[in-house]
Image (tube, rainbow, N blue to C red):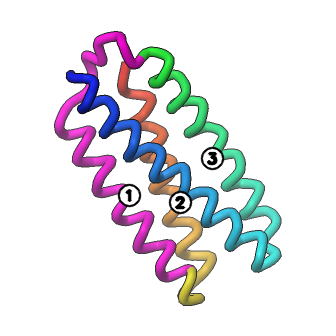
Amino acid sequence: MTISEKNELLDKMSTCYNKINYLKTIAEEKNEIDTASQLEIKKKELKTEIDKLLRDSYLNWDEFTAELNNKLTNLNKKLEQCIKEIVKNINFVQNIVKAVGYIDDIIKVAKKIK
């Protein structure tokens, strides 16, 4: 994997990280303290994985595949759709649950890259 490919992957994870911050802000504005706390935990988990990958960015990521890259792209799209619905006040709780599930999947992808 080239450095450019690694940077693209890290950008996708950073996009998710930023989306978590946005969701957390929405939850706080809605006074959904438990949800905001849960999102903060997920944000820290993803940050830990991003930091590990940044630290190891000059090592060979043998486990990286186009499939993982595509999965990150699709998960970010699904997460973005949840955010749009949350902003429109459509099924807040249901969309938060889906969003957290997508975030968990993104964290799992990050953990697979070694």
Q: Position of residue 85 (x, y in %)?
A: 49, 82
Residue occupied by mark 1: 76
Q: Residue at x 52, y 22 (%)?
A: 52
How far apart marks 3 and 1 lie (CA) works out to 15 Å
Label 1: which secondary element: helix
The answer to which of 26 and 111 lies nearer the viewer is 26
Looking at the image, do the residues carrying marks 1 and 2 touch, with CB atoms under 8 Å apart?
yes
Q: Which residue is drawn at 62% across and 66% down?
A: 23
Label 2: which secondary element: helix
How far apart marks 3 and 2 lie (CA) works out to 11 Å
Residue 13 falls in which quadrant of the image? top left
Residue 100 falls in which quadrant of the image? bottom right
Amino acid tagged 2? Lys
Vertical order, 90 against 84 (above or below) = below
Q: Position of residue 45 (x, y in %)?
A: 61, 37
Amino acid tagged 3? Lys
Q: Is residue 12 left or right of residue 19?
A: left
The quadrant of the image that shows the C terminus is: top left
Picture disc at residue 19: 2
Tell me if mark 3 has few (under 14), some (14-19) or many (20+) residues whose alpha carbon lies within 10 angstroms of its own.
some
**Magenta-highlighted residues:** 57-86
Instruction: Name the residue at the top extreme.
Output: 59
Q: Is residue 30 left or right of residue 45?
A: right
Give the dominant element type of the magenta stretch: helix, strand or loop: helix
The quadrant of the image that shows the N terminus is: top left
Amino acid tagged 1? Asn
Residue 65 part of the magenta segment? yes
Q: In this view, does 6 lie to the left or right of 14?
A: left
Picture disc at residue 53: none
Picture disc at residue 42: 3
Label 3: which secondary element: helix
